[in-house]
Structures are given as structure tokens and as C-alpha cells.
Amino acid sequence: MRVAAKKGKLVFAVVAPDASQNSLDKVVPLLRARQIHFVEGPSAALLGAAVGREATAVVGITDHALARGLRAAAGSSPGGAQ
């Protein structure tokens, strides 16, 4: 996810609210600096299960259409990061 954000390919992210502070300290500032929209989503366990992992702090979305749909479903404005 961080590599995609740094390369400019990431368009949206879902962040687990129960992720470790260390993970959040790495991810959230990067998302804000790159002006990538993100929302707080389900727990790390549920987010991980959705992508086939045990747990994950963040899921990055690179598909613009999927990102639009997720933003709309989450009620996130398209104007800026979170």
C-alpha cells in the first residue's frame, strides 16, 4: 500500500480503527501528505478477512471506479484526504 501511494497509484484507502498505533503513525501521515482519501473501516480482523489475510491495518484501492463506489458508500467527500 505504501509503495502504491508513493508511486501515485493509490486513490483510496480503508483504515482499520484498531490498527496498532505504530501502523497508523506510518500510514495516516503518508495518506494525508499524498492527499489520498481514506475512511475508517471495519476492524483489522474483518478488513484482513475481506482480503484473505489474518488481519491488516489498511487496504489500498488503486481502481478509480471502485474507489468512487467505496467513497459514496462511506459518505466520504471527494474533495480531500479524510
Image (cartoon, rainbow, N blue to C red):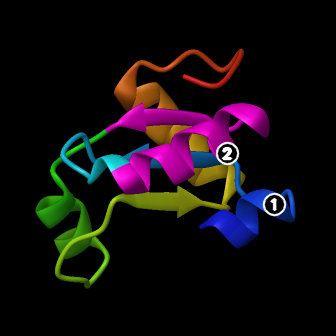
**Image: 16 above or below 78:** below
Q: Quadrant of the C terminus?
A: top right
Distance (Cα) linking label 2 and label 1: 8 Å
Q: What residue is at 48 percent from the left and 20 percent from the top?
A: 76
**Image: 3 above or below 60:** below
Q: Label 1: few (<14), some or many (≥20) within 10 Å?
A: few
x and y percent of residue 53 in the render? 25, 83
Task: Say which amino acid is labelled 2.
Answer: Leu
Q: Secondary structure at mark 2?
A: helix
x and y percent of residue 79 in the render? 71, 15
Pick whichever, 82 or 26, lies toward us. Answer: 26
Q: What residue is at 86 percent from the left and 65 percent from the top?
A: 7
In the drawing, does residue 50 fall left or right of residue 80?
left
Pick whichever, 70 or 34, lies toward us. Answer: 34
**Magenta span of residues:** 22-40
x and y percent of residue 49 in the render? 17, 74
Task: Say which amino acid is labelled 1.
Answer: Lys
Can residue 81 be spotted in the picture? yes
Q: Secondary structure at mark 1?
A: helix
Residue 30 tag number: 2
> Is-magenta flag for residue 34?
yes
In the drawing, does residue 7 fall left or right of residue 64?
right
Can residue 35 be spotted in the picture? no
- Work out whether mark 2 precedes mark 1 in sequence or the reverse, and give the earlier one: 1
**Image: 69 above or below 6:** above
- Do the residues bearing badges 2 and 1 touch, measured as CB atoms within 8 Å? yes
In the drawing, does residue 45 fall left or right of residue 30?
left
- Mark 1 — residue? 6
Q: Main secondary structure of the magenta part?
A: helix
x and y percent of residue 26 in the render? 54, 52
